[in-house]
Amino acid sequence: MHRSASRLTRILACAAVPVMLVVAGCSSGSGGGDADGSSTSPTAQPSATVAPAKFTGLPDACATLGRKTIDSLVPKAKVKGGTAGKSSDITARASCSWNGLDDNGVKGSQYRWLDISLTRYDSDVTLGSGAKRATEYYTKEVAGAKGTEGAKELKATPSSGIGSEATTVTYSLKKTDEDFSYATVVARTENVVVTLTYNGAGYAGAKSPSIADMSKDAVKAAKETVAAVSAGSGQTPATGESSAQESAKAE
């Protein structure tokens, strides 16, 4: 009886050995690695990219129009070189204005005001390309001109041949007891928006300029301004990359 019990104990002990080896073998492969022992790393996500903005700066707003143009649109301008608007970043926002009163004695006087505003947008991986952001601002500027309070005879028409897209908004507006004729041209050239406002009125019995004439002159000046933006704003090379793309390579 004692001999049988000892034999049974030895059999059970031997039977337990393979089980322990199997358990040990399984535990040695823990840790999430592959069967060959190599570890699996997460797949790297590609960095977001956006098309680079074409223009990297802005020209001097007061230098976008030639002297002949200023003399024609604003006779007797108080400051021939224009008055620059304040800007915290002249590479992104710039403006300039001219105004003058041409006194013709008993024939009355002619008043003119001309204002140019330049707004540039950089590309941003979150907000979109510079051209896309400029398009959004262009739409807002056109809507703002069309929504001028008190405007009469208001018309908005597309203007071809001015940058990437352009709209001319014309209307008349009563100010200081005089009827002013207005022409606002909003144009976008790539990632830059040009807003040109031209208005005038006759004083002391002089007839106010026609809206058609104001519109014609404003469109001509807008074309000249857009050309100045293209010539003096600096451009991103065709093979250039946005800052987002460059940072992605550096990582």
Image (cartoon, rainbow, N blue to C red):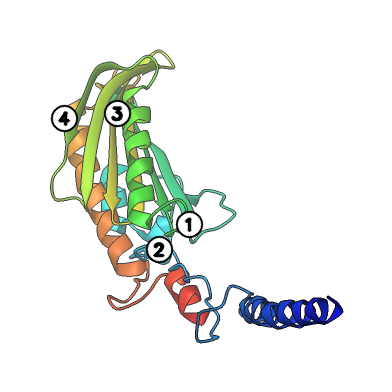
Mark nearest the camera among 1 and 2 is 1
Q: Residue at x 24, y 41 (%)?
A: 218
Q: Is residue 136 left or right of residue 25?
A: left
Q: Sequence-wise, which precedes: disc 2 or disc 4?
A: 2
Mark nearest the camera among 4 and 1 is 1
Q: Give 179 or 45, whichever is nearer the viewer.
A: 45
Mark 3 — residue? 182
Q: Sequence-wise, which precedes: disc 4 or disc 1?
A: 1
Q: Is residue 123 above or below residue 118?
A: below
Mark 2 — residue? 59
- Where disc 4 sits, the SS reads helix
Q: CA distance from mark 1 to mark 2?
A: 10 Å
Q: Residue at x 43, y 65 (%)?
A: 57
- Where disc 1 sits, the SS reads loop
Crowding near the residue tagged with mark 1, few <14, some 14–19, many ≥20 C-alpha atoms within 10 Å: some
Mark 4 — residue? 212
Q: Is residue 242 left or right of residue 131?
A: right
Q: CA distance from mark 2 to mark 3?
A: 25 Å
Crowding near the residue tagged with mark 2, few <14, some 14–19, many ≥20 C-alpha atoms within 10 Å: some
Q: CA distance from mark 4 to mark 1?
A: 32 Å
- Where disc 2 sits, the SS reads loop
Give the amino acid type for the residue marked by disc 4 in the picture.
Ala
Q: CA distance from mark 2 to mark 4?
A: 29 Å
Crowding near the residue tagged with mark 3, few <14, some 14–19, many ≥20 C-alpha atoms within 10 Å: many
The spot of residue 56 in percent (x, y) is: 41, 67
Q: Sequence-wise, which precedes: disc 4 or disc 3?
A: 3
Mark 1 — residue? 92
Q: Residue at x 55, y 58 (%)?
A: 89
Give the amino acid type for the residue marked by disc 1 in the picture.
Ala
